[in-house]
Structures are given as C-alpha cells and as structure tokens.
C-alpha cells in the first residue's frame, strides 16, 4: 500500500510529535484538531523542536523549512478524504475514538488505513466502529515521539496482513523500531509501566516518602531517566488515569485500581506538565 499523505488527528503532545516525524520522513501531513488554536500550538512545538535541531547542527535551515512546508493545518475532518493513512492521537477515551473512527470511515478513501495511537484501548473495539476493520490497526508511539525509538504495532482481530506490513514498513521509514504485540488492555508498554507509576502514587499517598525521594530512588537506584512521578506528569495525569481505568476494567482485577490521589489530581485539573501543575509545578 502506497502511503504518501498522512493525517494526524489531535495536535497535542503525541499528535504534534507524530506529525513532526512524518513530515521529517518526507510525508505530506495534515495536522488536525478541534480548534485552530490547538493546531497552531502543535505547529509551534514542531517549529521549536526543528529550530533546536538547526541550532545543534543536526538539521539545515532548508530541511527545517521543507519539513514545515509539508505540514498542513486542519480543523475540518473532511480533509481525511485526501489521506492514505490517518493516525488518531486524540484523548484516551473510547467514546471519542469510536465516534472519530466512525466519521473517518465515511470520509477517508477506501484504500486508507485508520491507525490509533491509543495507549491502552482495544483496537478490535475501535475497529468495530468502522466498516473496514481489516484496515484498522494500533500504532503506538512513545513520548517524546521524536526521541523514542519504539512503536508498538497492535493488530485488531480483523487487521489484514498487508495492512500490518504497510504500517511496519512505515514505522521503519520514520527510523522507528516496530514491535508487534497482541490486542490486550495496555498492550505490553502500559501493562507494565502504568502499574509501576500507579504504585509510585500509592507510595506517596500512603506517606512512605516524599515525591522527590520516590523519584530519586527510581532514578538513582534503577537508572530510570525520570522518576515515576515526574514521568506521570510528563505523560499527563488524565492519560495515566484513563490507562489505569482501562486495565482495571479490562482485566477485572483490583491490582489495577487507580490510586485515589491520582483521581483527585485529575478532578482538580492538575494534569501534569501540560496544565502547569501535577505532582510538581511547571512554568
Ligand atoms: N521533544 C523533542 N525532543 C526532545 C524532547 C521533546 N519533548 N525532550 C528532549 N528531547 C531531545 C533533546 O532535544 C535532545 O536531543 P539531542 O540528543 O538531539 O540533543 C535529547 O532529546 C535528550 O534531551 P535532554 O538532554 O534535554 O534530556 P534528557 O537526556 O534528560 O532526555 C528524555 C529527555 C528523552 C525525555 C528522557 O528524560 C527520557 O527518556 N525520559 C523517559 C521517557 C519515557 O519513559 N517515555 C515513555 C513514556 S510512556 C509512553 O509514551 C506510552 C504511553 O502510552 C503513556
Ligand atoms: P493531549 O491532551 O496532549 O492532546 C490531545 C489532543 O486531542 C488535544 O489537542 C485535543 O484538543 C485533541 N482532541 C480531542 N478530541 C478530539 C477530536 N474529537 N478530534 C480532534 N482532536 C481532538 O494528549 P496526548 O498526550 O497527545 O495523547 C493523545 C493520545 O495518545 C491518547 O490516546 C494517549 O493515550 C496516547 N498516548 C499518549 C502518550 C503520552 O505520553 N502522553 C504516549 C503514547 C500514547
């Protein structure tokens, strides 16, 4: 399957990163969100990342401008009619994703692949909202997208082999390392990572140590690049909570119950770095 034009739905931290690497990889990219200001915020982040690479001598000014020139802003979902591949990176909510996939199915060309960057939600259920479940697949990038090598690729029950192969090839063309995993809640990455983060929040909630101490133990003792509470802020506490809820509901096992402190922070609007406050305060 020939992929030339990619549409990315959601211009938040993941969508903007995915759009950036696709444009850097030579694809034409439509970056779509609900409001113009969200799209422009995403484009501004890309511009900043590319400018930093120019300053470091890793990219020429011309390569930066060519990359920016391949990015087209969108607030009209009908632009999906132009795309060969759509990568959805909207919020981690099944209702939002199934509505989007249902709409995209009606707009996108027949040959187009519909991929989701979901962190934890079943691809098979998302695919069932379309009339082309064989062309629906999970393409799970890691944050920050321009830096992290992994892309988990998740087949839904009906995903066609040629679709899997196209997405595997596309991930490689973006200089990523695709890893195939099965369609279970949280896949592999968040089945393992998120319970660790949730346990770190319980450790704080139960007063075992301060947030700084918990992060120091995991950074200095286990060589993690970020402590788990810093990482939770970086991912977004809303996303962490949605993922824990998906694991809890999906497996029906209380070992995945989200920590009440995580719920409280999300209810307060303390979503981590993106809202300026989570376990830590950001400028
Ligand atoms: N966007 C783009 N590039 C970034 C970036 C960002 N947000 N943050 C850092 N970088 C780049 C820097 O420009 C720098 O690039 P060069 O090597 O070209 O100079 C490089 O990354 C290293 O950056 P720094 O030296 O500033 O910082 P660092 O060495 O502390 O690394 C980090 C930053 C890569 C984010 C590191 O702290 C790290 O690996 N953290 C853990 C990240 C992680 O676990 N991600 C997975 C989250 S879970 C997930 O994504 C799945 C899910 O569904 C929730
Ligand atoms: P984010 O909150 O930074 O961005 C989400 C964006 O989606 C927002 O700009 C929002 O306006 C937009 N959006 C919401 N509903 C939409 C709709 N109906 N149509 C178009 N745009 C819509 O979130 P994020 O961290 O970028 O996460 C996006 C997705 O990527 C989630 O499914 C998340 O689980 C997944 N993910 C997140 C991470 C992470 O570390 N944050 C890592 C891998 C995967």
Image: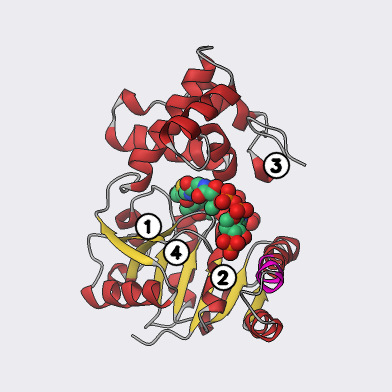
What residue is disc 2 on?
A: 19
Q: Position of residue 272 (x, y in %)?
A: 63, 38
Q: Earlier in the sequence, mark 4 or mark 1?
A: 4
Cα–Cα span, label 3 and label 2: 22 Å
Q: Is residue 204 visible?
A: yes
What residue is disc 3 on?
A: 275
Q: Earlier in the sequence, mark 3 or mark 2?
A: 2
Q: Position of residue 197 (x, y in %)?
A: 45, 32
Q: Is residue 95 visible?
A: no
Q: Is residue 8 left or right of residue 161?
A: right
Q: Name which residue lies at 56% across and 78% down.
A: 23
Cα–Cα span, label 4 and label 3: 27 Å
Find out if the beta carbon at label 4 lies less than 8 Å from the nearest ligand 2 atom.
no
Q: Position of residue 177 (x, y in %)?
A: 36, 65
C-beta proximity under 8 Å, tags 1 and 2:
no
Tell me where residue 42 sits by quadrant. bottom right
What residue is disc 4 on?
A: 101
Q: Nearer the viewer, residue 85 or 223?
A: 223
What residue is disc 1 on?
A: 126
Q: Earlier in the sequence, mark 4 or mark 2?
A: 2
Q: What segment is highlighted magenta in the picture?
A: 49-55
Q: Nearer the viewer, residue 159 or 280?
A: 280
Instruction: Tell me which image quadrant ligand 2 sits in.
Output: bottom right
Q: Position of residue 173 (x, y in %)?
A: 41, 78
């Amino acid at each position: 399957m020939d992929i030339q034009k990619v549409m990315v739905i959601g211009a938040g931290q993941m969508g903007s990163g995915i759009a950036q690497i696709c444009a850097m990889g030579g694809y034409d990219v439509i970056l779509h969100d609900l409001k113009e200001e969200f799209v422009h915020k995403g484009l501004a982040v890309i511009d900043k990342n590319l400018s930093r690479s120019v300053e470091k001598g890793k990219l020429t000014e011309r390569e930066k401008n060519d990359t920016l020139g391949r990015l087209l802003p969108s607030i009209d979902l009908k632009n999906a009619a132009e795309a060969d591949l759509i990568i959805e990176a909207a919020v981690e909510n099944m209702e939002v994703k199934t509505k989007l996939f249902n709409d995209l199915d009606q707009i996108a060309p027949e040959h187009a692949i519909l991929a989701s960057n979901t962190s934890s939600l079943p691809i098979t259920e998302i695919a069932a909202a379309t009339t082309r479940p064989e062309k629906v697949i999970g393409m799970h990038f890691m944050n920050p997208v321009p830096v992290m090598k992994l892309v988990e690729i998740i087949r839904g029950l009906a995903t066609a082999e040629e679709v899997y192969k196209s997405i595997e090839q596309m991930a490689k063309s973006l200089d990523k390392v695709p890893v195939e995993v099965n369609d279970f809640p949280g896949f592999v990455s968040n089945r393992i990572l998120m319970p660790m983060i949730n346990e770190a929040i319980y450790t704080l909630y139960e007063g075992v140590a301060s947030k700084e101490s918990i992060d120091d133990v995991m950074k200095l003792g286990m060589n993690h690049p970020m402590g788990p509470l810093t990482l939770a802020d970086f991912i977004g506490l809303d996303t962490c909570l949605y993922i824990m809820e998906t694991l809890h509901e999906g497996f029906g096992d209380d070992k995945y119950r989200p920590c009440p402190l995580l719920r409280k922070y999300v209810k307060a609007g303390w979503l981590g770095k993106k809202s300026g406050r989570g376990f830590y305060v950001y400028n």
